[in-house]
């Protein structure tokens, strides 16, 4: 849910996230659809892509948009 929420705050599509993180769009679709759990390296590049764009992951399940650190879309 955090992935979808973060994309929503950034107005990113699954393809936008895939491009920013350097992974396939299928990886994002499968992850968000609950079909697969990405490996730790993929989770890291997803987190870093969001953080560069200004997403902060909160304790628990939340996310918030802070000052963007990189390209948003």
Image: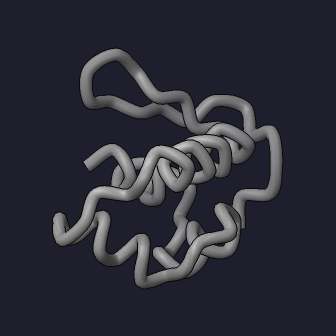
The mark tally for this picture is 0
Q: Which residue is painted at 43% across and 58% down in the image?
A: 8
In the rendered view, would you say 4 is above or below 23? above
Residue 10 in the image: state x and y as whole percent: 56, 56
- The image's colour scheme reads one colour
Residue for point 25% across, 66% down: 36
The answer to whether residue 10 is above or below residue 58 is below
Q: Nearer the viewer, residue 29 or 7?
A: 29
Residue 24 picture location, percent across and down:
54, 80
Residue 67 is left or right of residue 58, and the answer is: right
Furthest-top residue in view? Answer: 59
How far across and how far down the image is residue 34, in percent? 17, 64
* Near-viewer residue (54 or 43): 43
Is residue 29 depicted above or below 55 in this figure? Answer: below
What residue sits 32% from the left and 30% below the top?
A: 62
In which image quadrant can residue 15 be found? bottom right
Picture coordinates of residue 72 (x, y %)?
A: 71, 58
Q: Is residue 11 left or right of residue 66?
A: left
Task: State left or right for residue 54 relative to residue 24.
Answer: right
Indicate the quadrant containing the C terminus: top left, top right, bottom left or bottom right.
Answer: bottom right
Left or right: residue 5 versus residue 40 is left
Q: Nearer the viewer, residue 54 or 37?
A: 37
Q: Identify the residue shown where x is 33% and y is 44%.
A: 2
Q: Residue furthest left?
A: 34
């Amino acid at each position: 849910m955090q992935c979808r929420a973060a994309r929503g705050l950034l107005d990113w599509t699954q393809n936008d996230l895939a491009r920013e993180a350097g992974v396939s769009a299928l990886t994002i679709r499968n992850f968000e659809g609950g079909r697969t759990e990405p490996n730790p390296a993929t989770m890291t590049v997803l987190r870093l892509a969001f953080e560069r764009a200004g997403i902060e992951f909160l304790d628990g399940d939340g996310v918030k948009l802070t000052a963007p650190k990189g390209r948003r879309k």
